[in-house]
Image (cartoon, grey):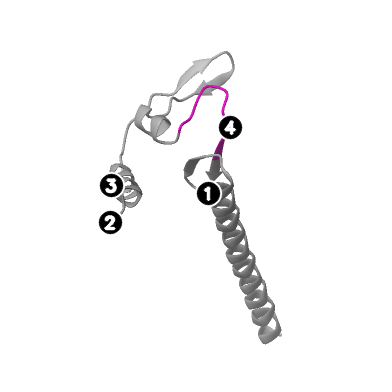
Amino acid sequence: MSNDMEKKKMTELIKMPMLEERRVTLSGSSLIMTLPKEWIEENGIKAGDTILIKVNGHIEIRAKNNENLDIMNKEILQIRNQLSHSVQSVANGSRNAAAGSG
């Protein structure tokens, strides 16, 4: 195995899931939460950098890069399509029930 492949494998192993509690603080009229130091270092985040935040009942935060932007946009599109199909199914069910009761 090449040295680069070994380094990549080790990097993936280091990215173990973690659960941390964070305290939300008030600064002026904004609520602020800090990000885990390990995640910041792992993703090369620096003060002033932009990050991506996906909100869908929970919050997912990723470093901003083209790969993560593509992944998150695809996930959001998939969720919106699923919701659209669900709404259409409910609407069709309501119409069919109304037609059958007449």
Looking at the image, residue 36 lies above or below residue 58 = above
The span from disc 4 to disc 3 (Cα, nearest Å) is: 26 Å
Looking at the image, residue 30 lies above or below residue 57 = above
Q: Are marks 2 and 4 in contact (CB under 8 Å)?
A: no
Residue topped by disc 3: 13
In front: label 2 or label 3: 2
In front: label 2 or label 4: 2
Mark 1 burial class by Cα count in 10 Å: few <14, some 14-19, many 20+: few
Q: Which residues make up the magenta segment?
A: 44-52
| Kind of residue sitting beneath label 3 | Leu
Q: Are marks 1 and 3 in contact (CB under 8 Å)?
A: no
| Kind of residue sitting beneath label 2 | Met
Mark 4 burial class by Cα count in 10 Å: few <14, some 14-19, many 20+: few
| Kind of residue sitting beneath label 4 | Thr
Query: Mark on residue 50?
Result: 4
Is residue 44 found left or right of 14 in the rendered image? right
Looking at the image, residue 69 lies above or below residue 82 = above
The span from disc 1 to disc 2 (Cα, nearest Å) is: 40 Å
Q: Residue at x 60, y 53 (%)?
A: 73
Query: Mark on residue 56?
Result: 1
Query: Mark on residue 72?
Result: none
On the image, the x and y values in percent for residue 82 come to 58, 65
| Kind of residue sitting beneath label 1 | Asn
